[in-house]
Image (tube, helix red, strand yellow):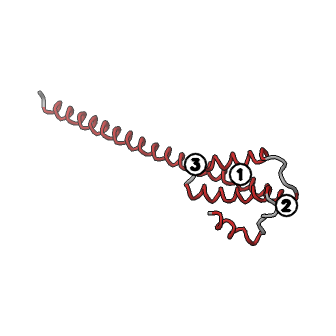
Amino acid sequence: MDQSILIALIGVGSALTGTITGGVISHYANKTIKQIEWQQSVKSKKIESKTNLYAVFLREVTDLQIDSRDSKINSLSELKTLTGLLMQIELISSTSVHENVAQLAYIVIDSHIIEEQKVPEDKVIPYIESRK
């Protein structure tokens, strides 16, 4: 075989090997980057979901607490939204978060049900501590 042909074949072979190696590396790098982006997106959506759930729960607690100053609930079924949110929080949060949220819910329920044991505003934190 002529030496110039051999040199040309080695050059073509080297170019193909370099292209294939670069393509494989690029493919795995892009795959890894996409996987990391997807994981970050999932984490971000979970955080956003929890934040929205907590905000809705706190809004419901606040509304019910304000309403308890004017009038009491007529039926426990009026607490469906509150208890539903509490159950959702129980499913997605840690035990400590759920316990603290449950304490808030108990305060609201108590304020609607038991007039004599209504907790004054300046006693809310000690009241929460006493229920633990």
In this view of the protein, which residue sits in the foreground, 125 or 10? 125
**SS at mark 3 in the image:** helix
In this view of the protein, which residue sits in the foreground, 18 or 102? 102
In this picture, residue 42 sits left or right of residue 70? left
Residue bearing mark 2? 69
* Residue at the outermost left position: 1
- Amino acid type for the residue under numbered disc 2: Arg
Residue bearing mark 3? 92
Q: What quarter of the picture does the C terminus occupy?
A: bottom right
Crowdedness near tag 1: few (<14), some (14–19) or many (≥20) residues, C-alpha within 10 Å: some
Q: How much space separates mark 2 and mark 1, taking CA atoms?
A: 20 Å
The location of residue 45, given as percent across then percent down, is 58, 47
Crowdedness near tag 3: few (<14), some (14–19) or many (≥20) residues, C-alpha within 10 Å: some
Q: What quarter of the picture does the N terminus occupy?
A: top left
Name the residue rendered at 78%, 59% in the picture: 111
Q: How much space separates mark 2 and mark 3, taking CA atoms?
A: 31 Å
Q: Which mark is residue 56?
A: 1
